[in-house]
Image (spheres, rainbow, N blue to C red):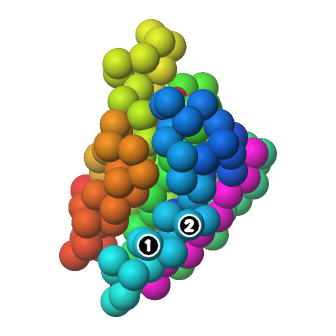
Amino acid sequence: MKVQIINGPNLNLLGVREPDIYGNDSFASYFIQLQEIFPDIELEYFQSNIEGEIISKIQEAGFGCDGIVLNAGGYTHTSVAIRDAIKAVPAPVVEVHVSNVFAREEFRHRSMISAVCMGLIAGFGLDSYRLAIEALKGKNKKF
Ligand SMILES: O=C1C[C@@](O)(C(=O)O)C[C@@H](O)[C@@H]1O
């Protein structure tokens, strides 16, 4: 099984950025842990601050892997184009957030992508990614 993790804008700053909200660990060090937790899953990791690059990665991975774990960062709340990309590909996508977006500012309560994702995991810190991979295990179609 092959799973693509995609992180959007500002998530390259995990561990540095607002640690009270996002924690002290970098995604690079957490990714090593994920690989140890899931030795039988081929995990790929991609991060971009650029909306179009995220869309291109969804298009590429969405036809070539068994599932996508997507933290679209701030684009979650704004991007029709990322929503369209998720809809366009056969791979199931799990929406992930480090923080509990529903306990934060009101503009974070609205997601452009939840309705076209298989499901949503938010608020468990970096462990949200592990839970998303667990959710994808054994699934190979959208809904
Ligand atoms: O950049 C982010 C990170 C986030 O997606 C999270 O992982 O908690 C939540 C978003 O609202 C925010 O813009």
> Tag 2: Cα neighbours inside 10 Å, few (<14), some, or many (≥20)?
few
Could you tell me residue 116's position as x and y percent? Answer: 39, 43
Q: Which residues make up the magenta segment?
A: 42-49
Badge 2 element: helix
Q: Amino acid at mark 1?
A: Gln
Disc ID at residue 33: 1
**Magenta span includes 109:** no
Q: From the viewer's perspective, is residue 39 above or below residue 24? A: below
Which residue is found at the position 22% from the left and 75% from the top?
Answer: 138
Residue underneath mark 2:
29
Q: Main secondary structure of the magenta part?
A: strand
Mark 1, ligand 1, within 8 Å: the answer is no
Which residue is found at the position 54% from the left and 53% from the top?
Answer: 25
Q: From the viewer's perspective, is residue 104 above or below residue 114? A: above
On the rendered image, what quadrant is the C terminus found in?
A: bottom left
Could you tell me residue 132's position as x and y percent? Answer: 33, 57
